[in-house]
Image: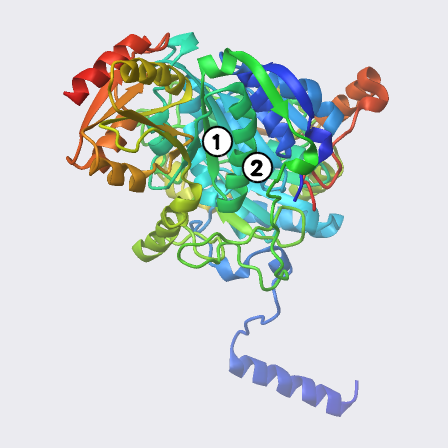
Amino acid sequence: MSDRAVQDEVSEAAEAKARGPSVATDEHPIAPYLRMDRIPHIWCPTCGIGTVVKCFATALEETGVNLDKTSIVSGIGCTGRVAGYMKLDAFHTTHGRAIPFATGLKLGRPELLVIVFSGDGDLSGIGGNHFIHAARRNMDLMVILVNNFIYGMTGGQNAPTTPLGARTSTMPYGNFERPFNLPHLAASCGATYVARWTCLHIRRLTKAFKEAIGRKGFRFIEVIAPCSTLYARLNKLGTGFNLMQFYHDNAEIRHGEDPRKVDIGFQEKIICGKFVDEERPTFLEMMDQHYEKTLGDKYVPMPPEGGMIHE
Amino acid sequence: MKADPAGVLTGAHYLDGDFACGEGAMAAGCRFVGGYPITPSTEVVERISRRFPMIGGTFIQMEDELASMAAVVGASWTGTKALTVTSGPGFSLMMENIGLAAMMETPCVVVDVQRGGPSTGLPTMAGQADMMQARWGSHGDYESIALCPQSPQEAFDLMIDAFNLSELYRVPVMFMMDECVGHMTEKVVIPPAEEIEIVPRKLTSRSVGEYLPYYADRQSVPEFARAGDGYRFHTTGLTHDERGYPVMSAECQEKCVRRLVEKIRSNADAIVRFEEFGTEGAEVVLVAYGIAARVTQMGMEIARKRGLKVGMIRLIVAWPFPEKRIRELAGEIKAFVVPEINYGQMVLEVERCAAGKASTVLVPHGGGGVHDPETIAEEILRAAK
């Protein structure tokens, strides 16, 4: 390097120091996947949902799926707001009904990639019946469930996922109800892809999303995420940062683990990994095959672009 | 446009009201049905599930009525005309997502083959006690359209209208049958497809960048974009602005709800439908609908034979209610007599519109059967005094 070049570099560095830290003006890499006109979002500082959204958007980008043919459906709750921030055909529906709404979308236009993105209370509490039946049918849906162990939006009430002993605003002396083991529930009902990660595992979570996008049938990914405003505060667990540290120290990856053995106890080990990844015919495939067999040429399947009758 | 011939079973048939209703849906272009079995409505989906695989339709039996209605709303957002079918207990469960359909402005049709209630009530026997639920069943303010056929033929004919109205106004339309109409078998003539006028889903002509999902004048209906066409729109059950984005303010609520209400109220004259006979010079006018209308007509004949001047309004569309005509008649007659298979529902509308100018008499029936025409005749005689 010439003396002149060294001098320039030194003076540039001095100028930069004088200007102070700079703010990147480039667009965020996932901005094209978001409704930037709705940002800032409503989530609390150190909430885990944003991280899950980032991983999901990255998965959309890296798989290169046709975004015009991708729909996202949410129910109600903190995670229920995800659909509202994604720049896709987006449906913010009623509490617990994201899965049946998504079922209608998929059957009404079979070519769509339909993703359900909602919370633990929404999908496994009020929507629990729909969850098990969609898994049973192997309905072509990818279901992302963010589990923060609590009803966040309404103020920290007990959820079907609250670990035994954890305090919530409606179990102020600690929860005494047994929670769901969601991967076990999904797997036992027939889900063909079942994984669990925490939102500390951003690379693995992104990879799971990418994998699930490429699969068919009922795909279920549970993501453990911190709720620092309620769950952490009510249980004196510190902030979201402390919970991330907890995940770091206590998450254990066990691919292929028997889903019956992945219960989550209060501040106990969180078993992560891919538990189920198998291929079985989906609802639509079963329907097509069955009608082709029984009705032969008389069978007229709904076209991939849907049952809309055109002029 | 004309109906898709694939769905039209042209010819003269001997069908029960439920089957005729199913045929009407298929002729109207319905290609998605999500339902949960409930007596006395099951024959509608049995008919449809038998024919759907041959006409490009998909039927799915959902896990409950909450799911059925949610699936119907979802399917409609693909442009596929969607239907669900139920009876009282299921109708109650569907109210949640009927509200969502109203708020998201989603065209769809909900059939309620009414039975006796409340609760499980009389599963296999007639009732007409869900008429107010059809209007007010889901929470919050919205306007409803409800049709009430009185025969299998009308179950077919009005089903076409129900789908057309749902498309025109982007609302869930309530199809208020009753167990008698659902289970009675009569001649049903299904015309050729080219004689059936259907309203197709009208997709927006705006480009992706220009499209706003809820942009509309105060009293009109916004343009529709379906999922999968690249619009990447957003819709929600929350109070929303023209972009379909949630806005939590009294101003936005006012604008949002006012339009949901006014798009129906301002078009009520075009939607209202009733049959009127013998009202000229009448002292008493009967108001009835569904199976009760057929019995009421018999009661009217008896009263006429006894020398009374009796006319009748038969509601074909129950909601919106024919306010104007009832108000006019109230100034000309002595009394309205309203036989219905409930303890006073549509009679409240008649009374409201009569506004004290004519007396209003309810002839109630608790359900499980129909009125004795003689009872109706006696009430007419009493009202005429």
Residue A34: image x %, image y %? 58, 56
Q: Residue furthest bottom?
A: A4
Q: Which one is in front, B234 or A124?
A: B234
Q: Which residue does the image show at 65% across and 39% down from the upper left?
A: A114
The kind of secondary structure element at disc 1 is loop
Q: Which residue does the image show at 31% across and 13% down from the upper left?
A: B302
Q: Chain of mark 1?
A: A
Q: Nearer the viewer, mark 2 or mark 1?
A: 2
Q: Which mark is residue A228?
A: none
Q: Which mark is residue A96?
A: 1
Residue A46: image x %, image y %? 46, 49
Q: Which mark is residue B74?
A: 2
Is B195 positioned to the left or the right of B154 in the image?
Answer: right
Q: Which residue does the image show at 22% across and 28% down from the upper left?
A: B283
Q: Which one is in front, A183 or A133?
A: A133
Q: Chain of mark 2?
A: B
Count residues near mark 2 (Cα–Cα under 10 Å), then give few for <14, some for 14-19, many for 20+: many
Three-letter amino acid code of the residue under disc 1? Gly
- B163 w.r.t. B93: above or below: below
Residue A64: image x %, image y %? 75, 51
